Each structure stands twice: as structure tokens, then as C-alpha cells.
Image: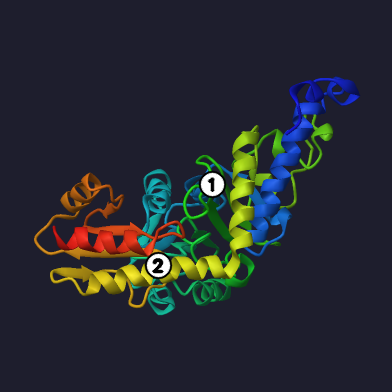
Amino acid sequence: MRAADDLISGPAYLKGAGLFALQAETNARAREAAARLVGAEPDDVALTQNTTHGMNLGVGAVDWREGDEAVSATTEHPGCLAPLHTLQRRFGVKVKLVPTPVTAEKLEAALTPRTRLIALSHVDWTTGEVLPLQEICALARERGIPTLVDGAQSVGNIPVDAPATGADMYALTGHKWLLGPEGMGALYIRPGFDAPSTNIGYLSLEDPKSFYPEGGYDLHPGARRFEASTMSPALAAGFAAAAEAAHERGAEGLEGIRRRAELLASSLEKVPGITLRSPRSAQSGLVSFEVSGVAAKDATKRLLERRFVVRFIPDPSPYVRASTHLFNTEEELEALTKAVAEL
């Protein structure tokens, strides 16, 4: 870390390049780390606040008209569905929801000539199921329909190669499985995907020096056209460090997450009165279950009193979800199973 005196002295600062240059350098490091994490190039990644911010940018990149349709799933997170339902109220867009488990066949049956966007998660936040994303995106590409992916529960949890999925837009965050700071994420834009940004500002410009009030300046040709204004360099640095650490853990770290989920799921499966809602065997670090005779919200509260941090998945079918990560020990997972059994 450079001393403050170094940043505010010398010709660079006098030219206005000190703090701004350091911030640009930090943002570049964050973009590079995020891109490497999802198998992309830095120019194809824009920094955002989080996954929901990225999903809103992606939804806004479509030129919506009354009567258009968007397709998603019944179990999607509000970070995906709320922007879509807002389209319904503002433009008269019809939102069609496919029941789980989501398959390419179900999605194909929901598509019409008016479908303008498919918006789905890579990993279902309710059960941890991994969607057949490559098959879905290939279907959408054949129909000329853009795809927007919620990667909140995938990046840092399962292997992710955004270009290989075929997704046009892929949103992620730094504060979940990456264990980074809240308030910083990224949005991958497939090279060649012509998606206009509704989030425009100084940082969107390819050459800020070319700006003049009458217009005529150019935006970044890559994903950075979705960046608009000042971002926290502290959050960017934290995001970069978290993404770099996850990249260094690699496949072995991801397998360690899945192995812990499998251990917890197999243990819970043996408890009378417990019904697993996650796939068997575990596809990700999420393990969801129902406790017979105990409401999900009540079970979550009682487990928290015993220092187990789990969450309930809300209606229409409430149940409990646990997230297993590398810092969870086998003893902790066994203790959680015992606490659930005692409910």
C-alpha cells in the first residue's frame, strides 16, 4: 500500500493522475481477477455492485415493447424476477415462468416469436440444483433470443466457464461463495453481443478526453460500457483479492465444497422426519431440507439459537437451506445434523 504522501505529491498528482490512476489500476485488477475466474477476458467484464445490479443492467439492455415476453423459472430469486415483473408493469411485458426442474425442453415449449429474453440462474438458489445452462443457451441462440444468467450461487461454488455456457450476459457477486466484500460484483458480456447499456457515465467512455457537450464521443466497445461512475477502490481491491484466492483454490477447492455438501446431505438423509429438497447426490454447496412438523422459519430460528446459521426458503413451499463451504469442518456438519434431529 502506498503512503498517502506518495499519492498526493509529484507531477502525477499535479496532473490529476494520482488517486484516479490508482483507482483505475485497482479496477483493472478486479476486472482481470473476475474474468479469469469465469474463463473470460478482462475486456468482456464490467464491474458492478452485485448480481442484482448486473441482472438489472442485463434486463435494461433489451429494447422492450408492449406484448414482448420474458421467460424465467418459478424458483428464481427476486434479483431476477423483480426486474422482470417491473417490465410487466411499465411496458406490458408478459413474464412466463417455467416450473422446476428447469430443462431445455420446458423452456422451448414456453418460447414464442415474442420472446425477447431468457433469464435464469446457473445454480438454483432454493435447492442447489445446477441448470443445464449450455443446452439452454444453445437453444436460445438458435432462436435469436438473448440469455441473462444469475451467477450469484455458482461462481466460487461450482466450476464456471462463462464463454463455454454460451450465455450472452452473466452476472455475479463477490460477497457469497467468493467470500469477498459486499457491494462489488461483475457482469460478463459475450464478445460480439450488441447490448446497449442504460448505465452511462464518465467511465463508460472509450476516451474520456473526447467528451464534449454536443456529443459524438464513443463508448467502450467491450463490457466496460456498462460501468458509469466512481466505484470504491477498497471494495474493488477486496473483490480482486477474493477472486484471486478462489482462482488459486481451483478445482480442488470447488470439489471440497461439494464434498462437504454431500456429507451433510447423506447425514441428514438418515434422520427420521427429514426430507431432502436438494438433488442427490449434491451438485453444489447448497443443501435444502424439510423438517417434519416444524415450520421452516421456526426451524431456522431455533437452529440459529444453537449457533447454526441457515436460512429458510420462502413460500410457496418453505424449507431450510444450509450453505457448506471450505471453512466448515466435518464436526460442524455432524453437529448441525444432530441439532436438526433434535428439532
Up-down relation of residue 94 to residue 50 (above or below): below
Give the quadrant of the N terminus. Answer: top right
Q: Is residue 111 visible?
A: no
Please name the amino acid that badge 2 sits on: Arg
Relative to 160, 115 lies left or right: left
Mark 1 sits on what residue? 180
Q: Is residue 225 visible?
A: yes
What x and y, as percent, mark residue 62?
55, 53
Residue at point 67%, 53% (across, down): 33
What x and y, as percent, mark residue 210?
83, 34
What x and y, as percent, mark residue 297?
19, 50
Which of the 4 quarters of the picture holds residue 261? bottom left
Outermost residue to the front: 331
Relative to 300, 181 lies left or right: right
Mark 2 sits on what residue? 260
Of 42 and 101, the residue lying toward us: 42
Check disc 2: other Cα within 10 Å, few if <14, some if 14-19, many if 20+: many
Residue at point 80%, 27% (across, down): 18
Q: Which numbered disc, 2 or 1, marks the residue that appears first in the sequence?
A: 1
Residue at point 62%, 60% (across, down): 247
Of 21 and 259, the residue lying toward us: 259
Check disc 1: other Cα within 10 Å, few if <14, some if 14-19, many if 20+: many
Up-down relation of residue 240 to residue 133 (above or below): above
Instruction: Say the numbered circle drawn on residue 218.
Output: none
Which of the 4 quarters of the picture holds residue 170? bottom right
